[in-house]
């Protein structure tokens, strides 16, 4: 009985003990046995990084598939707000934590300079027992990852013997929101406090004042670059001083020229295709055009000329202190101006697209390769937290390049390119005229006068009230700044200036004349009341927004459309270029930071690069000085030869002077048989051909010579002349290559022995600098090869060759206008019947272009019909005709071809006269000269560059 009672109690006690043991073992397994281990030994790799003084290590964690890595990391993101929980950073110094204060793509912006002491480590973890991580809370998961990293991937079961010192931290990133619901991504760096029994201490990585100042400076620079973006355009595109200038050539008595001119609607009748010009397509010629429009058609007029206005491009002339010589100038002429296309090996290459297959969006690759993944992760993290991403100063990062705003800009540029390609030349000219005028007004306005006007307004209280002005000044500035700041922004920032000017052009063209006059009267009334002290007239004296008094029905909307297209295109281009320029500014700043931070590593490279620039400039500047000295010598010789004429011109005041062209002739060389001056028709334009040099003198008495004359005289038969440019540049390049080889040898020796003997970076820098100065010492103290022969201006040999070059020099110049010396012109009357062309057609008798009043009668007001004599026949194949003005509605040569005149074979007799003659002779000619001929591409290009 007793044993039967004890046995059930014993069995129950045993079962209780067994159950309790199972529960305890399960709890222990849950808390102790879930251990994270790396799948491979990464501690040696980490120790190698630390031994190499790496400042920052990016550790990317991953889990095996059986541990559900996606679910684990997703829980850490949602529950704890950890940004990219698989990405951790180990900072070994203050420098490493300072990198975390910069932009996420600092390595790309600094051209990898800031990533010199930065390493990346990929670690795959496994959990033991498998799948135990899924039973842990998010806080325990985060603690397990952090403890593993703090122990240098040594499991806690093996002891907490990590290598982190007091300055070493393990960092992660968290998503936090501010009071405006904008997301901020903050780095939190933690370390184990061994003195506090292993307690983990964490601190936020906040940007210190210097980092904030740096980032603000970068933002300010980006804004200024955008505001001054129009200033990046070359001034030679719109400044008046780089435009085509007019120089007057006065023909002396012995060069008196009489030109035979004719106006006709049937130019093919006269058989001088090489002398026909379309009157409506000729630029300039205001005085000659006024004279020609008074002539009757098909009458020969003799015009005596002694004054010709030449249109000269400013870049074609050289002042005394400038020569187009140098390595950069050579690259500019041959690459940007594409003068290499004249060389046969480069003909096909120069016909290729400049960009080729290169994507013009240089900003795009960086975005899609480096920035897009980070931005997308940030957007997802902010969305999960119910926050918004703030604007960080870059529209590309804030909107993405595929945003509708960017797409609209892309479409506008594509449409502009397509439309501009099919527009008529007159419309293109109007587009250029509006835009370039706004650019010119923007640039020509003096900023100094604006600043002086602002200063006079600021000190106005002191001018009126003396010392009491200190009391009035605060209230005065409160009233003045709303007016002053917009005006300062308009005159100081080119982007705002250009935009406002384009908008004003829209207002001027849209606003009716009556409303415009009323607005002007209201403005004048307002200004007159305050102008006594504000002095607005000094600010607006040079401003002029004029428009034509009347527009046709379609011209007004067309002009408005032109201005609006300019404005929209400008801001579209500015917006896209703004992103590219801001990205370039960031790259420049971060690269500069990288050079400073890694100075101990990059100092040797920088010293070598510095010496390369120094010696490169020295080698090629020697060539520049040689040609500049020679240029000054020939300038002095030319001024000495024309001293008397220049002195007579310079005596007049600047307002009374005109830009003058003087023909120079050498006395110590025989003259040529070529006529001194001649009028030609080339490429449907008038050209003034001179058989010797023209010296140009502007209103400021500054002499200029043609650039081509300088290029042709550098290789005279004299020992002191510099010779061909490419020979001197090749010699300078050879010297530079020798210095490069020596510098590379010095650099390799310093780096090799510095690494072998553990020489400090400072001593390596000193050794590199000392070796880099050796070529300088040898070049300037032990060698005289850099001292070339100079020109003796008193040498008879030099003067003879120089004067010969002057007399043999020939060049054609664009004609801006022809001014008759005697306005009364002698006319050859029109015959009764014009000859037919073998019965093919009979040109109709065209009515006169205008009244027959000559040029002299325009001034006197008297008609000159009494000067006409009885009609007499003239020779229709007379080769003495100089210019035939074509006033037909179609091209004369095309019209003649349509009538069949171009179908006759060479050798046939003249179709306009029964008398025969040789080709080009005075009595007639074969049909070969009647064939329409067009200049070749090469000839056209040469004519355009005269």
Image: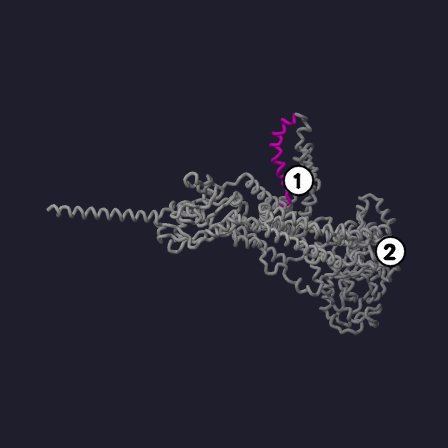
Disc 1, disc 2: CB below 8 Å?
no
In the image, 151: left or right of 724?
Answer: left
Q: Is residue 117 rendered to the left or right of residue 532?
A: left
Can residue 575 be seen here? no
User: Of circles 1 and 2, which is in front?
Assistant: 2
- In the picture of the structure, the residue carrying the numbered disc 2 is 799
Quadrant position of the C terminus in the picture = bottom right
SS state under label 2: helix
Q: Which of marks 1 and 2 is nearer the N terminus?
A: 1
| x and y percentages locating residue 470 in the rendered image | 64, 27
Expressed as whole percent of the image width and height from the top left, the position of residue 53 reads 53, 48
Residue 798 is left or right of residue 12, and the answer is right
Real-space CA distance between mark 1 and mark 2, rounded to the nearest whole angstrom = 64 Å
Q: Where is residue 540 in the image (x, y as percent from the top left)?
A: 69, 40
Q: Outermost residue toward the top?
A: 468
Residue range of the region highlighted in magenta in the rendering: 468-495
For the stretch drawn in magenta, the main secondary structure is helix
Q: Is residue 52 magenta?
A: no
Q: Residue 441 carries which label?
A: none
The residue tagged 1 is: 520
Q: How crowded is mark 1: few (under 14 residues within 10 Å), some or many (20 or more)?
A: few
């Amino acid at each position: 009985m007793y044993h039967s009672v004890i046995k059930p109690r014993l069995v129950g006690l045993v079962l209780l003990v067994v159950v309790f043991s199972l529960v305890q073992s399960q709890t222990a397994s849950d808390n102790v046995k879930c251990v994270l281990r790396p799948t491979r030994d990464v501690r040696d790799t980490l120790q190698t990084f630390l031994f190499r003084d790496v400042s920052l290590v990016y550790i990317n964690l991953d889990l095996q598939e059986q541990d559900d890595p996606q679910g684990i990391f997703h829980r850490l993101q949602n529950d704890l707000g950890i940004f990219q929980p698989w990405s951790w950073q180990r900072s070994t110094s203050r420098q490493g934590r300072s990198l975390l204060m910069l932009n996420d793509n600092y390595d790309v912006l600094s051209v990898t300079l800031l990533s010199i002491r930065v390493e990346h480590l990929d670690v795959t973890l496994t959990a033991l027992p498998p799948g135990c991580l899924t039973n842990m809370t998010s806080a325990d998961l985060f603690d397990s990852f952090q403890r593993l990293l703090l122990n240098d991937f040594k499991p806690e079961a093996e002891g907490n013997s990590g290598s982190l010192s007091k300055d070493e931290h393990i960092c992660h990133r968290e998503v936090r929101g501010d009071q405006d619901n904008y997301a901020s991504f903050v780095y939190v760096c933690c370390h184990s406090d061994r003195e506090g029994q292993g307690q983990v201490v964490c601190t936020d990585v906040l940007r210190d004042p210097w980092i904030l100042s740096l980032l603000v400076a970068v933002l300010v620079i980006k804004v200024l670059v955008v505001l001054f973006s129009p200033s990046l355009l070359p001034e030679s595109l719109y400044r008046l001083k780089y435009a085509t200038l007019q120089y007057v050539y006065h023909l002396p008595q012995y060069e008196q020229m009489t030109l035979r001119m004719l106006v006709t609607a049937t130019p093919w009748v006269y058989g001088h295709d090489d002398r026909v010009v379309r009157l409506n397509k000729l630029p300039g010629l205001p005085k000659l055009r006024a004279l020609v429009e008074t002539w009757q058609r098909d009458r020969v007029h003799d015009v005596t000329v002694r004054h010709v206005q030449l249109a000269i491009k400013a870049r074609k002339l050289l002042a005394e202190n400038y020569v187009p010589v140098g390595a950069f100038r050579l690259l500019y002429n041959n690459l940007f101006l594409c003068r290499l296309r004249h060389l046969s090996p480069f003909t096909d290459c120069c016909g290729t697209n400049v960009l080729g297959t290169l994507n013009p969006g240089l900003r795009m690759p960086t975005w899609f390769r480096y920035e897009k993944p980070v931005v997308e992760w940030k957007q997802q993290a902010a969305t999960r937290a119910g926050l918004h991403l703030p604007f960080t100063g870059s529209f590309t990062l804030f909107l993405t390049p595929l945003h509708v705003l960017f797409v609209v800009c892309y479409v506008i540029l594509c449409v502009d390119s397509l439309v501009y390609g099919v527009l008529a030349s007159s419309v293109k000219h109007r587009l250029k005229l509006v835009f370039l005028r706004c650019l010119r007004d923007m640039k020509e306005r003096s900023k100094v006068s604006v600043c002086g006007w602002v200063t006079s307004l600021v000190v106005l209280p002191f001018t009126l009230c003396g010392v009491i002005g200190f009391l009035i000044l605060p209230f005065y500035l409160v009233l003045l700044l709303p007016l002053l700041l917009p005006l300062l922004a308009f005159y100081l920032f080119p982007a705002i200036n250009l935009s406002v000017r384009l908008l004003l052009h829209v207002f001027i063209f849209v606003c009716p004349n009556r409303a415009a006059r009323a607005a002007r009267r209201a403005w004048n009334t307002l200004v007159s009341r305050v102008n006594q002290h504000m002095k607005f007239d000094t600010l607006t004296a040079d401003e002029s927004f004029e428009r034509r008094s009347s527009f046709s029905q379609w011209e007004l909307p067309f002009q408005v459309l032109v201005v609006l297209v300019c404005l929209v295109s400008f801001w579209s281009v500015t917006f896209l270029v703004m992103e590219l320029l801001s990205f370039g500014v960031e790259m420049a700043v971060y690269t500069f930071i990288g050079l400073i931070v890694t100075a101990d590593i990059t100092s040797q490279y920088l010293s070598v690069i510095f010496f390369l620039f120094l010696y490169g400039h020295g080698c090629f500047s020697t060539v520049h000085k040689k040609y500049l000295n020679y240029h000054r010598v020939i300038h002095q010789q030319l001024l000495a030869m024309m001293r008397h004429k220049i002195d007579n011109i310079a005596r007049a005041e600047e307002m009374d002077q005109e830009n003058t062209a003087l023909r120079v002739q050498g006395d110590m060389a025989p003259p040529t048989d070529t006529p001194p001056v001649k009028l030609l028709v080339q490429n449907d334009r008038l050209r003034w051909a001179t058989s010797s040099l023209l010296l140009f003198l502007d209103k400021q008495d500054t002499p200029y010579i043609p650039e081509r004359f300088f290029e042709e005289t550098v290789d005279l038969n004299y020992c002191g002349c510099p010779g061909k440019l490419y020979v001197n540049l090749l010699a300078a390049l050879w010297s530079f290559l020798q210095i490069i080889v020596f510098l590379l040898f010095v650099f390799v020796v310093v780096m090799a022995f510095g690494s072998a003997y553990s020489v400090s970076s400072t001593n390596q820098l000193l050794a590199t600098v000392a070796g880099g100065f050796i070529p300088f010492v040898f070049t300037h103290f032990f060698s005289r090869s850099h001292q070339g022969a100079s020109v003796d201006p008193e040498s008879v040999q030099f003067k003879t060759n120089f004067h010969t070059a002057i007399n043999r020099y020939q060049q054609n110049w664009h004609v801006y206008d022809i001014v008759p010396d005697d306005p009364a012109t002698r006319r050859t009357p029109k015959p009764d019947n014009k000859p037919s062309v073998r019965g093919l057609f009979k040109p109709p008798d065209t009515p006169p272009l205008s009244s027959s009043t000559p040029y002299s009668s325009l001034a006197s007001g008297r008609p000159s019909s009494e000067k006409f004599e009885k009609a007499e026949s003239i020779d229709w194949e007379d080769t003495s005709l100089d210019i035939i003005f074509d006033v037909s509605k179609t091209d004369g040569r095309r019209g003649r071809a349509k009538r069949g005149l171009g179908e006759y074979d060479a050798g046939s007799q003249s179709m306009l006269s029964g008398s025969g003659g040789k080709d080009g002779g005075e009595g007639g000619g074969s049909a070969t000269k009647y064939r329409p001929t067009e200049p070749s591409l090469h000839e056209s290009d040469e004519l355009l560059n005269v």
